[in-house]
Image (tube, rainbow, N blue to C red):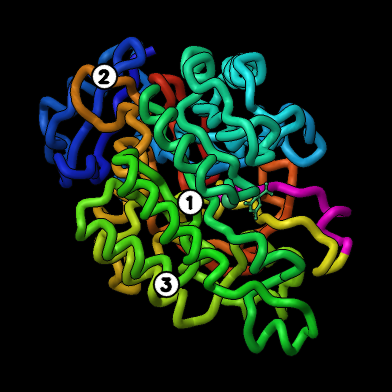
Amino acid sequence: MDILISGGRVIDPGSYDGPGDILITAGRIAAVTPAAAPGAPERASTDSRSGVKVIDASGKIVVPGLIDLHVHLREPGFEHKETIATGCRAAVCGGFSAVCCMANTRPVNDSPAVTEYILAQAAKAGLARVYPIAAVTKGLEGRLLCDYRELKQAGAAAVSDDGRPVLDSRIMRLALEQASQHKLLVISHSEDLTLSEGGVMNEGAAARKLGVAGIPNASESIMVLRDIALSELTGAPVHIAHVSTRESVRAIRDAKARGVPVTAETAPHYFALTDESVLRHGADAKMSPPLRSEQDRLAVREGLADGTIDCIATDHAPHAPDEKAAGLTQAPNGIIGLETAFPISLRLVDEGVLSLPQLIAKLTLNPARILGVPCGLTVGAAADIAILDPCAEYVIDAAMFKSRSRNSPFCGMTVRGKAVSTIVGGQVVFEDNRAA
Ligand code: DOR
Ligand code: ZN
């Protein structure tokens, strides 16, 4: 069925920001027209066309579907935490029409068979687009490079050992060289394990108060600096995942100024929270890299504002309640993020860090460019669209999550902003009827 999205504020980063109607035919955008005044003849005639589903988007913003460069869907192997179907359900509820899933599954996504399995499960779910990220090294062990040619052929969109760093600099150099030959971006989980091992949270006052071992900022920035050096050496692009420290922001800013092909993402928790949150939320505020200091939080926001940090990704990392209940030291790293990313990020607009179109770019066009996938509301493009209500106010409640897991430090927080409709390839895959 054709769809007409009518009366919203259309924001297509870099191209258009204003009132507009969008017509979707056969899964594609057929027309984008500045909205007619209410009651104007053109609008009335369009509305009365038969066979058209009209979505009233007045008071809402209409944007390209959000794209998340960094999620953990846990399938195959950890289906008790999340499946591709439940993770994709969470994605579309959060306004995401596409997610990139990390390779730290069981088995690891280091073979065409696993990449193809993920794509098949995603097709079966029929919700968000899924771009599988394959491993850099076999078994994420940091020793033997994967066969990038066959992974690319199978549908891998990038490579990363995320969850673990590629500790050996020579292996990382070879990975950059070989992956770039196959047009695969290397995404770096920047962590020097010799500095972070045994650490439970950020090194600082909160860790001392809790009497647990800390993880210093340098464990991240040393590897960010190394990967920038290796990108410079090889000429291959590198993408820095989940930037959390001021030193990393500075290093990436300097590298970009020199013309190094480095890009970067951060996650909402790094610009919304500090390590103080661990005192209140315990293991639900434990992730890798850890929440940092207020100075770091402010630096991450500056990095977003000046373009040093290109995009916002969630690092959605579901874990089962009993796993997170194991205590701060024993609990696994990670928090879920797909269903809270938009409201948490919208605060950047309220607080004057980014304009609304800049924020939308960091959730849509910028990640799409980094990954080399289509994005935008131009005529002829696949209709991947999110309709967002920037005004809806509510308390984040674990019971609302479609994710199979509940591990979020944002529960109980009053926020504004939610997805009310998500469209992928012209299909309405999420509709919040309460908000309609
Ligand atoms: O907090 C994290 N959780 N960081 C990672 O790098 C891995 C992820 C996971 O897989 O749970
Ligand atoms: Zn990571």
Q: CA distance from mark 1 to mark 3?
A: 14 Å
The dot on residue 241 is 1
Quadrant including the N terminus: top left
Residue 325 located within the stretch drawn in magenta: yes
**The residue under label 2 is which amino acid type?**
Ser
Circle 3 residue: 247
Residue 95 appears in the picture as rendered: no
Q: CA distance from mark 2 to mark 3?
A: 57 Å
- Range of magenta residues: 315-326
Residue 226 appears in the picture as rendered: yes
Q: Are marks 2 and 3 in contact (CB under 8 Å)?
A: no
**The residue under label 1 is which amino acid type?**
Ala
Residue 268 appears left or right of 4: right
Q: Secondary structure at mark 3?
A: helix
In percent of width and height, residue 58 lies at 30, 45
Residue 370 located within the stretch drawn in magenta: no
Q: CA distance from mark 2 to mark 1?
A: 48 Å
Asked if the beta carbon under badge 1 is closer than 8 A to the nearest atom of ligand 2, the reply is yes
